[in-house]
Amino acid sequence: MEQFFKLKQHGTTVRTELVAGLTTFMTMAYILAVNPNILSNAGMSAQAVFTATALASAIATICMALLANLPIALAPGMGLNAFFAFTVVLGMGYSWQLTLTAVFLEGILFLLLSLFNVREAIVKSIPTNIKKAVSVGIGLFIAFIGLQNAGIVVKSDATLVALGSLDKGPVLVALIGLVLTGVLLAFKVKGALLFGILGATIVGIPFGVTNIPKNWNPIGSPAAPLLFQFQFDKVLSLDFFVVFFTFLFVDIFDTVGTLVGITTQAGMIDKEGNVPRVKQALLSDAVGTVVGACLGTSTVTSYIESAAGVADGGRTGLTALTTGILFLLALFLSPLFLLIPSAATAPALILVGLFMMEPIKDVELYDFTEAIPAFLTIIMMPLTYSIADGLVFGILSYIFIKLFTGKVKDISAVTWIVGILFIIRLVMK
């Protein structure tokens, strides 16, 4: 371990790395409950998605450990799973098989871009403030989904949305879980989201929200994943391209942002601000997405929750290796994670939305040619129930405002191409 992970060189020990890996797992294990819950809305088997989630997370995280030697864990990304289920399948009417195909092809392209170092050109082509706005918009979208899942926000014929009945069981369970998780976060308890979900699940028993089957056992054999469920017959349509591009866009920038944030926190950034072994890290991310699609889950990406393990002293791939092995062990706890009702996972969705709001402080609000496109990107995602539509409004408003204010030089060639494709999509919609 010393020779492979270079523990002394990174100022760490085996014990420190193992504890850090456990901490990272505890902070992101909520995805094992949330991801099957979200993707089941798309008509996918929750049991099969659980297996795919655990396996894809384990494989991608172990790749990160062995290829990049970084303390970063990966799993199906929050926001991208919501985009998969609610925008593409339920909103656009695509089958989940076709959506998995988009994820698979996006992963293949990401793999090629990582191998040939093309990623930098794509990153530079998207306006900086829109990159930041995407995270914020997805955060609001996820929080909105959580509020809906709990019944705290309901549909209204008069105002489109309204406050739900606060005396119903699911709403009370969600609110109790929200307060509990908030208190745990305030006290900096590691694994606060996971403990909040488990606490709300227990609270849901007397409320009749958590239903425990007879002869229930928390340990069980994992279900078979949805292997190679691809559909290639509509991959040449314009809507498919928008879906494909959105998966690729969010995956690239979510990964880059996480890599920069975690390695900066760990003091691993070099004097030029470069992430160590970034090519290997991006390859691990791309492999995770391809493997995840083959197994039957949405895009796999690097998790910002890895910061918890870094804060506990994790500095090498041994931290990630530990987290990956724990995901494999979690495969045999599927009855426990699948017992959790949507009301219990709603607080985690709402608070993940909060975490994703952080980039708002870095958006240039005093330059209206930057602020307005960023604002439209943010606000249109939850209000249109579509991450893709938020991107369309953000990119197109950026192009038109820059064009008519004499700042056309700010618009890159790739941004022009994307904008033209978005206009065609709107015309044909």
Image: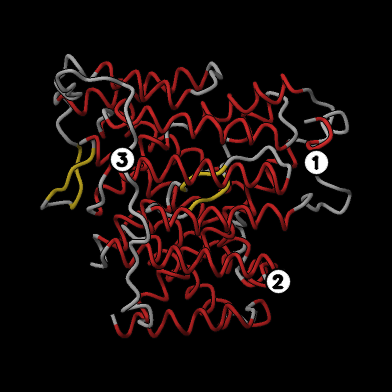
Disc 1 target residue: 268
Q: Which quadrant does the C terminus fall into?
A: bottom left
Q: Residue at x 49, y 67 (%)?
A: 106
Q: Earlier in the sequence, mark 3 or mark 2?
A: 2
Residue 288 marker: none
Q: Earlier in the sequence, mark 2 or mark 1?
A: 2
Q: Quadrant of residue 20?
A: top right
Mark 2: few/some/many CA within 10 Å (<14, 14-19, 20+) = few
Q: Residue at x 44, y 30 (%)?
A: 330
Q: Is residue 203 above or below residue 292?
A: above
Compared across the picture, whether 2 is left or right of 128 comes to: right
Compared across the picture, whether 14 is left or right of 49 comes to: right
- Marks 3/2: CA distance? 37 Å
Residue 116 marker: 2
Q: Amino acid at mark 2?
A: Phe
Q: Mark 2: which secondary structure?
A: loop
Disc 3 target residue: 223
Q: Mark 3: which secondary structure?
A: loop
Mark 1: few/some/many CA within 10 Å (<14, 14-19, 20+) = some
